[in-house]
Image (cartoon, rainbow, N blue to C red):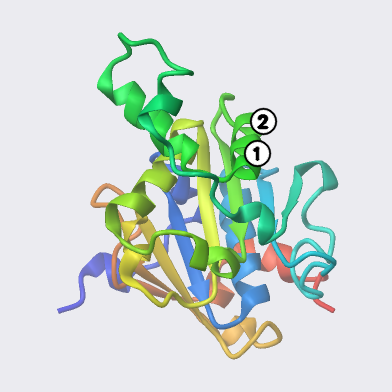
């Protein structure tokens, strides 16, 4: 039986920011997934920080938010694949050079999680995070660097929590996942559409949501019913 909430009108996209949650958005149309991530992040916070993974000497996706001017330059961080590689494993000796011996175990665990991030990511999180209110962070094309990172459970959750503890609200945009680790995110959405030109005929399926979210697992909504997405795409698509 389909729950009444799953069959009803979807909540406004700003509801993704109700809790300190990590959101994963995926689909086969890379530019449409990027636009949906931007719509969700901007619905919560008008000027989200944008991290764009791409190969060196390659420009942004031609029909995506960066190329079409939806991401201000002062909010854009371009990260190449080489810059996205994690640094050396964190050893106990490394930890004790940057923390006091009487630090609580939770603090040590948080720092360990942060140091798992590549140096470039640590720089971005440190620069953008730690501010009130919580800033939205879009991580676009995360599938381009997935080979560098753990694909299962606790380790993925540790990376998500590192950004949340830095007072950021992360939105990861990706092509379809190949391993179950994406279910470590709090909110998971699948964008189903033939492509960007037919976006209004596509759907947004909520695959996973927290119990206290306004979204509900199993809910499927027409993309054309999302005013936040329409306000971005109307007049911007080539």
Q: Secondary structure at mark 2?
A: helix
Q: Position of residue 97 (x, y in %)?
A: 47, 18
Residue bearing the label numbered 1: 124
Of the pair 207 and 97, the residue shown nearer to us = 97
For residue 43, side relative to residue 106 (left or right):
right
Toward the bottom, the furthest residue is 194
- Up-down: is 218 above or below 188? below
- Name the residue that disc number 2 marks: 127
**Side of 58 where 232 appears, left or right:** left
Residue 3 percent coordinates (x, y) = 20, 70
Residue drawn where x is 36% and y is 29% of the image = 92
Q: Residue at x 65, y 88 (%)?
A: 198
Which quadrant: the C terminus? bottom right
Q: Quadrant of residue 69?
A: bottom right
| Element under disc 1 | helix
Residues under numbered marks 1 and 2 in contact, where contact means CB atoms less than 8 Å apart: yes
The residue at the point 47 percent across, 36 percent down is 114
Q: Is 27 placed left or right of 180 in the picture?
A: right
Of residues 173 and 154, the one nearer the viewer is 154
Horizontal arrangement in the rendering, residue 124 relative to residue 65 (left or right): left
Indicate the position of residue 150 as horizontal and vertical percent values: 39, 59
Identify whether 198 is placed above or below 97. Answer: below
């Amino acid at each position: 039986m389909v729950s009444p909430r799953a069959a009803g009108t979807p909540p406004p996209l700003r509801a993704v920011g109700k809790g300190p949650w990590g959101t994963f958005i995926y689909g086969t149309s890379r530019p449409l997934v990027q636009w949906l991530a931007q719509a969700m992040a901007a619905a919560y916070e008008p000027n989200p920080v944008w991290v764009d993974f791409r190969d060196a000497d390659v420009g942004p996706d031609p029909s995506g938010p960066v190329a079409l001017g939806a991401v201000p330059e002062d909010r854009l961080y371009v990260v190449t694949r080489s810059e996205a590689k994690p640094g050396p494993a964190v050893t106990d000796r490394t930890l004790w050079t940057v923390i006091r011996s009487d630090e609580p175990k939770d603090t040590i665990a948080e720092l360990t999680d942060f140091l798992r991030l590549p140096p470039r990511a640590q720089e971005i999180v440190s620069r953008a995070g730690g501010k009130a209110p919580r800033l939205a962070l879009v991580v676009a094309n995360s599938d381009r660097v997935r080979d560098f990172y753990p694909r299962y459970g606790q380790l993925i959750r540790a990376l998500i929590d590192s950004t949340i503890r830095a007072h950021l609200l992360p939105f990861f945009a990706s092509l379809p996942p190949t391993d179950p680790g994406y279910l470590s995110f709090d909110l998971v959405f699948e964008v189903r559409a033939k492509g960007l030109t037919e976006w209004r005929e596509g759907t947004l399926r909520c695959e996973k949501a927290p119990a206290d979210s306004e979204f509900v697992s199993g809910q499927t909504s027409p993309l054309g019913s999302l005013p936040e997405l329409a306000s971005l795409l109307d007049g911007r698509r080539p």
